[in-house]
Image: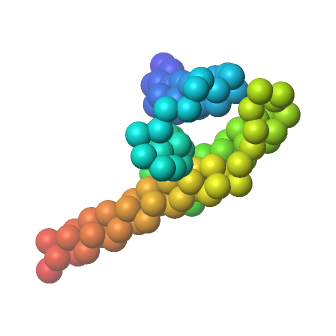
Amino acid sequence: MKFAKSAIRFLPAVLWTAAILYLTTQPMPEKVQLFPHFDKVMHFGAFALLSILTAFAVRGAYPLISIVFVPSTIGAIVEYLQSRLPYRSACLWDFVANFTGTVAVFAVFMLYRKILANSKHRLRD
């Protein structure tokens, strides 16, 4: 029973990873960009969300690994897979956007953690 509850926490991250892998390995539809570099914003958002979901899955433990390393590794794998597909291409700037999304979530998480620790400290005084 305990394992099932733990596994359920990982389900959103696993499903989102599957969605990212599926969408990024499909043939590209005609590019419809709302503004220049819109795809980079999408990469940033997709991997920021993945970072949030992995942090939730491990309940904030090991933040550098769960928030930055795991999602960034998935981002690198995505770009590698795209480089191997005849109808897709890898882009260093896509990976940079992926990585930046993870680092942004890490920064917010660490700031939140610091604020929370300071507020608990003030309550004790």
Q: Which colour scheme is used?
A: rainbow
How many labels sit on residues?
A: 0
Tell me the residue at 59%/23% (across/down): 29
Percent of width and height locating residue 45:
45, 45
In the rendered image, the vertical position of residue 115 relative to residue 44, given as above or below: below
Percent of width and height locating residue 110:
41, 65
Q: Looking at the image, which is closer to me, 69 or 93?
A: 93
Residue 15 visible in the snapshot: yes
In the rendered image, the vertical position of residue 51 relative to residue 29, given as above or below: below
Dividing the picture into quadrants, the one containing residue 52 is: top left
Tell me the residue at 20%/70% (across/down): 119
Tell me the residue at 42%/46% (across/down): 35
Percent of width and height locating residue 26:
67, 22
Q: In which quarter of the image is the C terminus?
A: bottom left
Q: Looking at the image, which is closer to me, 16 or 58?
A: 16
Dividing the picture into quadrants, the one containing residue 97 is: bottom right
Horizontal side of 80 relative to 121 (left or right) equals right
Q: Looking at the image, which is closer to me, 1 or 72?
A: 72
In the rendered image, the vertical position of residue 62 relative to residue 88, given as above or below: below
Residue 124 visible in the snapshot: no
Percent of width and height locating residue 41:
47, 48
Tell me the residue at 14%/71% (across/down): 123
Dividing the picture into quadrants, the one containing residue 79 is: top right
Horizontal side of 40 relative to 120 (left or right) equals right
As drawn, which residue projects farthest toward the bottom? 125
